[in-house]
């Protein structure tokens, strides 16, 4: 422990040393003033219109494409390390994103994410698909807090927008090659420019591969790597003045096995073929995964007049996900998941009418969403477990739920300026949604064939449906204390759809009894956003309080699945983030959060502690919601002269997370103790920034920490997965 503490302190000193050196040099003379060095500011579209990030009266963080590439960020799990109050977990290849304690803990049944993901205005409905390659990104916007009015359903915790680069008006391109730890290799690039008068195109793509960090015995194979192919094409048409049509197609496929659960405690079954060593699994059955995502979109922007414009976003998303896992993670022929499939096909249409007057800005919107999704979980019983069920070995139990969702919404968002300093923003969304479910459970017995899984399914699958209508209001009062300091107070409401469980292994949760309720949040927030010291410092703060009802939590139901239940909770906290440009060469940034997220009115049965019966969990922490987190980073740019690579930029980051409960009973086995993380990076570039050489090392201290925990009663063990160990990479890119 002492050795690790020394390492983290050394990293912190390495980050701070350039600050101390540069500051002392810059202010050595009493009459010397600091050079002008402002913090870069970003224009975002988080509120569905272009605004300077500092003028948005909401908790929004934005990460530029340059920032993502410099730090080796490629997906949501890495973004979570850079944005305050965002936590990330993983289960069977699903990303479990939590913002301010609000998020999904297990991808069970037909459960949907609680943090909405968007790529260029296109909703990505499933937690198995939140990956957008950084090669073609302009920025990522992270909105914290319910976004019900503008984003609607399933934005209870917030929203993450991936914004792509648009086709350029002049010809340009880039080629990139990379390597790194665990035999990493990647190639990527893009070309962009005019194709004809009023027609512009952009084509990008690449391939990434890397061995996994979880080693399987005795096969020697690995899990948690990459084998990804991706491509995106974009076309911008400008047939007339004031009319722009953007067409885009994106495809990504990952064939690397990224679904697993390893033992955290010994399996209580008769075999020595098991291990508790982090990132090691003993297994007798294969692991495999394949996910494919196709996104097609058309965005039309029409400037009707100087004050009114119309936007249309049409999208289609086709997603396929298939995972096979040795679910008992031992050498014993126990049970394994074979071809766990979670397909989704969705279509959406949104219209926005935007207007602006002397004192009023407004948006009127209509939204239609249709999705067909499936969730089929087949569990093969091996020679050890099959006799206990009275069936022969290799019998397969399959629980499944198919769903069809139709959602209609109308919304309005109006901002009225009482004066140059005071504005009132009012929003209201009406959301009407119908969901139809088809629940099934079958048993495939060798030599017999397929039979109903229980008497309830003797006549075939069971159909059930739900209908919900919801008003989602927002009230936001904004007041500019000065030209560079603004404040706001806001009330908003969030909503997440209910769903249907996979039938539990106890034969329950069938039909209407398997439905679980929607989630709702009443959210109150006060914020302050500031530009200070000639705009060399940006500092933003927020305080929030959530009254959380219907929180969807999960109970393990052996042997095949989990069952979603509803709970209530209270969440409140403080958060702040800053960027400080000390000089033209030296910058600091950081964040800190205090969050109190606790159950309020929930009782549950812990199959890991059956003797305790049903437990009152009032006051217990919510999963993935640490009480305190902090991050400090700094970068220093060094001028190397007139050579080929003339600029060196070095950066270091240190972060801390308090204890994190990963399974809501909060026992020692359910919790990841407090931990530190650190990373470093460096970038060499030429004077025109056409050629760049990047090096990054993430998790510099090689910290082993848990990302997710579940309990499997069939083997009497806690299971889950760990985050990636120390990972380094080198990238060489050339623009032309």
Image (tube, helix red, strand yellow):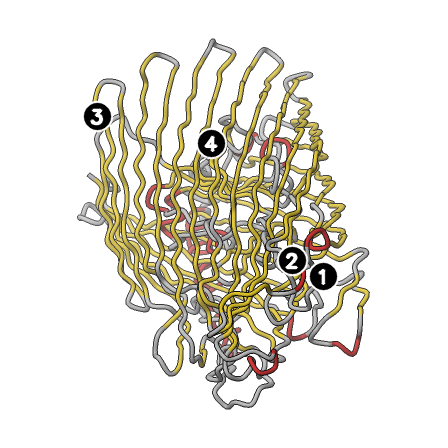
Q: Report the residue that reaches farthest toward the top.
A: 305
Do callouts 3 and 4 mark residues in contact (Cβ within 8 Å)?
A: no
Residue identified by numbered label 2: 625
**Residue 479 to residue 266: above or below:** above
Residue 32 seen: no
What percent of the width, then of the height, locates residue 162? 45, 41
Disc 3 packing (10 Å; few <14; some 14–19; many ≥20): some
Residue identified by numbered label 3: 195
Of marks 2 and 3, the one in the foreground? 3
Distance between the Cα atoms at labels 3 and 4? 27 Å
Of marks 1 and 3, the one in the foreground? 3
Mark closer to the chain start, 1 or 3? 3
Distance between the Cα atoms at labels 1 and 4? 36 Å
What percent of the width, then of the height, locates residue 157? 62, 46
Do callouts 2 and 4 mark residues in contact (Cβ within 8 Å)?
A: no
Do callouts 2 and 3 mark residues in contact (Cβ within 8 Å)?
A: no
Distance between the Cα atoms at labels 2 and 3? 49 Å
What percent of the width, then of the height, locates residue 354? 54, 18
Of marks 3 and 4, the one in the foreground? 3
Disc 4 packing (10 Å; few <14; some 14–19; many ≥20): some
Q: Is mark 4 on a helix, strand or loop?
A: strand
658 left or right, relative to 183? right
For the point 51% across and 56% down, the residue is 95
Badge number at residue 621: 1
Disc 2 packing (10 Å; few <14; some 14–19; many ≥20): many
Of residue 702 and residue 560, the one placed in the foreground of this image is 560
Mark closer to the chain start, 1 or 4? 4
Residue identified by numbered label 4: 43
């Amino acid at each position: 422990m002492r050795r690790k503490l020394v390492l983290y302190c050394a990293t912190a000193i390495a980050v701070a040393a350039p600050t101390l050196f540069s500051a002392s040099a810059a202010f050595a003379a009493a009459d010397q003033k600091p050079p002008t060095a402002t913090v870069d500011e970003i224009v975002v579209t988080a509120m569905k219109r272009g605004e300077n990030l500092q003028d948005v009266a909401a908790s929004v963080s934005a990460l530029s494409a340059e920032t993502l590439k410099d730090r080796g960020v490629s997906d949501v799990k890495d973004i979570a390390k850079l944005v305050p109050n965002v936590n990330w977990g993983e289960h069977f290849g699903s990303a479990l994103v939590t913002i301010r304690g609000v998020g999904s803990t297990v991808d069970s049944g037909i459960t949907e994410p609680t943090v909405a993901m968007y790529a260029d205005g296109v909703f990505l409905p499933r937690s198995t698909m939140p990956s957008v390659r950084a090669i073609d990104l302009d920025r990522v916007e992270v909105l914290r807090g319910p976004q019900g009015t503008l984003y609607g359903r399933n934005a209870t915790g917030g929203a993450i927008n991936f914004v792509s680069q648009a086709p350029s008006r002049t010809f340009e391109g880039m080629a990139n090659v990379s390597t790194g730890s665990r035999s990493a290799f990647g190639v990527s690039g893009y070309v962009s420019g005019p194709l004809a008068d009023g027609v512009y195109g952009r084509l990008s793509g690449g391939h990434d591969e890397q061995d996994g960090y979880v080693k399987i015995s005795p096969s020697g194979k690995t899990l948690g790597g990459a084998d990804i192919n991706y491509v995106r094409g974009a076309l911008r048409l400008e047939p007339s003045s004031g009319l722009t049509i953007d067409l885009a197609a994106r495809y990504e496929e990952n064939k690397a096995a990224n679904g697993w659960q390893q033992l955290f405690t010994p399996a209580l079954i008769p075999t020595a073929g098991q291990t508790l060593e982090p990132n090691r699994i003993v297994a007798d059955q294969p692991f495999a995964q394949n996910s494919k995502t196709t996104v097609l979109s058309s965005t039309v922007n029409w400037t009707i007049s100087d004050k009114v414009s119309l936007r249309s976003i049409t999208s289609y998303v086709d997603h396929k996900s298939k995972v096979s896992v040795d679910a008992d993670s031992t050498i014993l022929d126990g049970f394994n998941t074979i071809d766990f499939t979670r397909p989704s096909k969705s279509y959406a249409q949104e219209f926005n009418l935007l207007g602006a007057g002397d004192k009023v800005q407004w948006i009127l919107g209509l939204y239609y969403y249709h999705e067909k999704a499936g969730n089929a979980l087949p569990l093969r019983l091996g020679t050890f477990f099959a006799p206990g069920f009275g069936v022969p070995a290799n019998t397969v139990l399959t629980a499944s739920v198919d769903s069809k969702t139709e959602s209609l919404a109308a919304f309005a968002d109006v901002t009225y300026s009482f004066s140059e300093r005071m504005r009132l923003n009012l929003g209201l969304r009406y959301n009407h949604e119908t969901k139809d479910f088809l629940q099934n459970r079958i048993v495939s017995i060798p030599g017999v064939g397929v039979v109903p899984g229980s008497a309830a399914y003797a006549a075939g699958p069971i159909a059930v449906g739900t209908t919900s209508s919801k008003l989602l209001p927002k009230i936001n009062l904004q007041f500019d204390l000065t030209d560079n300091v603004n404040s706001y107070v806001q009330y908003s409401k969030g909503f997440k759809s209910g769903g249907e469980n996979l039938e539990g292994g106890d034969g329950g949760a069938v039909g209407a009894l398997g439905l679980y309720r929607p989630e709702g949040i009443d959210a109150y927030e006060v914020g302050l956003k500031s530009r200070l010291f000639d705009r060399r410092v940006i500092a933003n703060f927020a305080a929030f309080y959530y009254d959380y009802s219907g929180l969807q939590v999960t109970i393990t139901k052996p042997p095949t699945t989990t069952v979603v239940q509803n709970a209530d909770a209270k969440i409140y906290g403080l958060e702040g983030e800053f960027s400080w440009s000390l000089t033209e060469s030296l910058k600091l940034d950081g964040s800190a959060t205090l969050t109190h997220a606790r159950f309020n009115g929930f009782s549950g049965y812990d199959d890991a502690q059956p003797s305790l019966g049903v437990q009152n969990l009032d006051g217990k922490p919510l999963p993935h919601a640490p009480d305190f987190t902090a991050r400090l980073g700094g970068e220093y740019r060094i001028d190397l002269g007139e050579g080929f690579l003339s600029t060196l930029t070095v950066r270091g980051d240190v972060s801390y997370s308090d204890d994190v409960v990963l399974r809501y009973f909060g026992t020692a086995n359910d919790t990841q103790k407090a931990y530190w993380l650190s990373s470093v990076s460096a970038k060499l570039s030429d004077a025109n920034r056409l050629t760049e050489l990047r090096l990054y090392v993430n998790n510099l201290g090689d910290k082993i920490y848990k990302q997710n925990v579940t309990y499997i009663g069939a083997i009497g063990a806690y299971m889950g997965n760990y985050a990636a160990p120390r990972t380094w990479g080198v990238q060489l890119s050339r623009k032309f």
